[in-house]
Amino acid sequence: MLLRGSHVIGEAAMRAGCRFYFGYPITPQNELTEYMANGMAALPDGVFIQAESELAAINMVLGVSMTGKRAMTSSSSPGISLKQEGISFLAAQELPAVIVNTMRGGPGLGNIAPAQGDYLQATRGGGHGDYRTIVLAPGTGQELAELTRKAFEYADRYRIPVIILGDGMMGQMMEPVEFPEPIDPASLPLKPWVLDGAKGRPSRILKSLILDTSAMEEHNWKLYRKYQIIGDEIPEVERFLTDDAQLVLLAYGTASRIAKGAIKRVREMGLKVGLLRPKTLWPFPKKSLLEMSRRVSDFLVFEMNTGQMLEDVKLSLEGRRRVHFYGRPGGIISTPDEIAKVINNIYFKEGLESEE
Amino acid sequence: MATKSKRGFIKIAAELCKGCYLCESVCPFNLISVSEKLNQKGYHPAVYDEEGIGIEKHKCKGCALCALVCPDIAIEVYRE
Amino acid sequence: MKQVFGRTESLKDTAFHYCPGCGHSIIHRLVAETIDELNIKEKVIGVPPAGCAVLAYNYFDIDMGEAPHGRGAAVATGLKRSLPDRVVFTYQGDGDIAAIGTAETIHAANRGEKITAIFVNNGVYGMTGGQMAPTTIVGQISTTTPGGRNPDRDGIPIDLSEMLALANGSVYIERTSVDSPKNIIKTKKAIKKAFQVQMAGLGFSLVEILSPCPTNLKMSPVQASEWVSSTMTTQFPLKVIKDEAGNLGAAPPSE
């Protein structure tokens, strides 16, 4: 099936058994909201509400999630900021949810061009309090389908909000996609913690108010232990031409596609350069990076921002390897030639050709 | 041959009472007063006592106005 | 002798934490009694607010899910859309529903969400220590209106219920009070009708309940109730603001 990226996410969500979508228009992600409006209308049990705000949309997701059903919302950077209140509550109450952020240039109203300025917001929890969300960064149309399915699975498995981080370019690009078989929501396992009326069981409370400081501390550590498990279980990367690489790029999403174009160009010139592409931004695939650093002396982080994932790369390597950075914030889309030039400069400046 | 009005009585749970005295303010027969003792919360609870008062003088009809206004569900009402 | 008044089943056997003379616990009781009279304890889901009643789930023995401050109507929308045959209500104070959650409330009413809002109007932010509320009346002293609410600076109290009555999807809106036995009985009737409107699938229902906050009014409980009767009701007259419920007697009873 040939579909644009935003439609792929929508289709994959419905096939994952999501029957509840709530959203508020914001460019460049309206195609997803519109796709869900049509898709949910065509499903007998589909519910679509165009909410009065992103605040309302995320809290409608919260309400559905309390009943144990799969729900999704989507927005773009400024709207995602508004959703942070709800995301913090979802994290605190350990409720599953899928949130799509089609990032745009910022801060403030910014512009509608593709950017990656929300990396830190997404990977550090984004809202108030000591929590994390799983952050997935698809790099292809096919991955939009696969990672959207995974987003719902992770959300349910770990009772956590999951963010799919893309941008307008990912949303617009048309690629052939093979979808997994649709899931019947009725076939999903029942969740033992849901609110559905206390029939034949004691009443339940889903809440995040924990006035007792010891209990609040324990809740924080409980979340922390869960995050440790997630960190062990789900990090995912793609390795592209890294086997013999002297210099390894790190890039995700749209930036990783540009990076691949650049790597193909410099490979033609004989430079041994590869790409390590995180598919999970949180948890950050630290192990894969460290593994690669045993053999590789130089890394180049390329982002469409002023250096955000750069922090995770440096934190992972702890100064053991040289970390270079190239970034273009504000919605500028670098060309593969531009990145190839950057690679060339670093490659020869660091004398990597002589290490062969 | 006048119909005899029903009799009733109330029980005030002194430990639930927070001494707001809304019950005292609504009792049609002024049967509720303030205890001189303190409860464990530190309030002087409302008290009602018509025990052993004799049928002729017993006034509480179990109208439940006191229970209706009691914010703390400290009052149980009984009626014949 | 037989017991004619006691604790109803949908309330846990827990003492309320509210201040002496607070209207919240009376309203909790009325909601719980209504739930039991309608026999919906096993199909009701409540959404407690931020504010003094944030701990409502310590008292109601029913399923409850906490919403962020003001977002009750949005959370209730999600709950109800997911489980249309359950009875979903929000319990919200004046700051929650008429200030920070105004948008969520108006739009839920406008969509005709089949939910019920219990709107407790005590004219003050209680939990945070007595600041001006959207419903603080003109001249009323609060910690943020030390000289009294000044319309030039602070605007006049918002009539949220009247605003909601304009929404096409709202069906039943009544303003009552818990300042006297008579009004407490009326309040319970209103709550019951609001739930029945929802159960009949008619649309959005809301009961605004004027409630005394003796602590922040700096009055005795009896004085605070009198203040609600004499002063607050002049700004917020007790009345049925909207009733398009028709004959609810024909509504199907709960199972």
Image (cartoon, coloured by chain):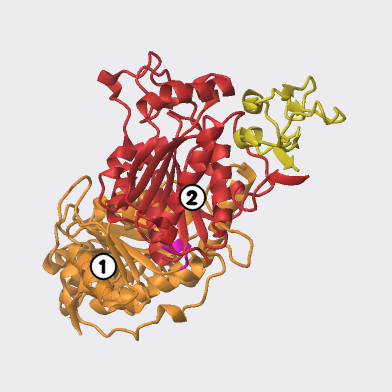
Chain colours: A orange, B yellow, C red
Question: Label 2 vs label 1: CA separation?
Answer: 54 Å
- Across and down, in percent, residue A163 comes to 35, 63
Is residue A254 or residue A191 the one in the foreground?
Answer: A191
- Across and down, in percent, residue C197 comes to 40, 55
Residue A172 shown left or right of residue A159 in the figure: left
- Residue most extreme to the right: B52
The chain containing the residue under callout 2 comes to C
Q: Label the magenta part by its dominant secondary structure.
A: helix
The answer to which quarter of the image holds residue A285 is: bottom left
Can you say whether A348 is above or below B71 in the image? below
Give the quadrant of the N terminus of chain A.
Answer: bottom left
- Secondary structure at numbered mark 1: helix
The stretch in magenta equals A63-68
| Residue located 38% across and 61% down the image | C201
| Residue located 26% across and 71% down the image | A354
Residue position marked by numbered label 2 in the rendering = C192
In the image, are marks 2 and 1 on the same chain? no
- Across and down, in percent, residue A327 comes to 22, 56
Q: Mark 2–mark 1 contact, CB under 8 Å?
A: no
The chain containing the residue under callout 1 comes to A
Mark whose residue sits in front, 2 or 1: 2
The amino acid marked with disc number 1 is Gly
- Residue most extreme to the top: C147
The answer to which quarter of the image holds residue B13 is: top right
Is residue A307 or residue B30 the one in the foreground?
Answer: B30
Residue position marked by numbered label 1 in the rendering = A253
Residue A175 shown left or right of residue A310 in the figure: left
The amino acid marked with disc number 2 is Lys
Can you say whether A278 is above or below A313 in the image? below
Q: How many residues crowd around disc 2 within 10 Å: few (fewer than 14), some, or many (20 or more)?
A: some
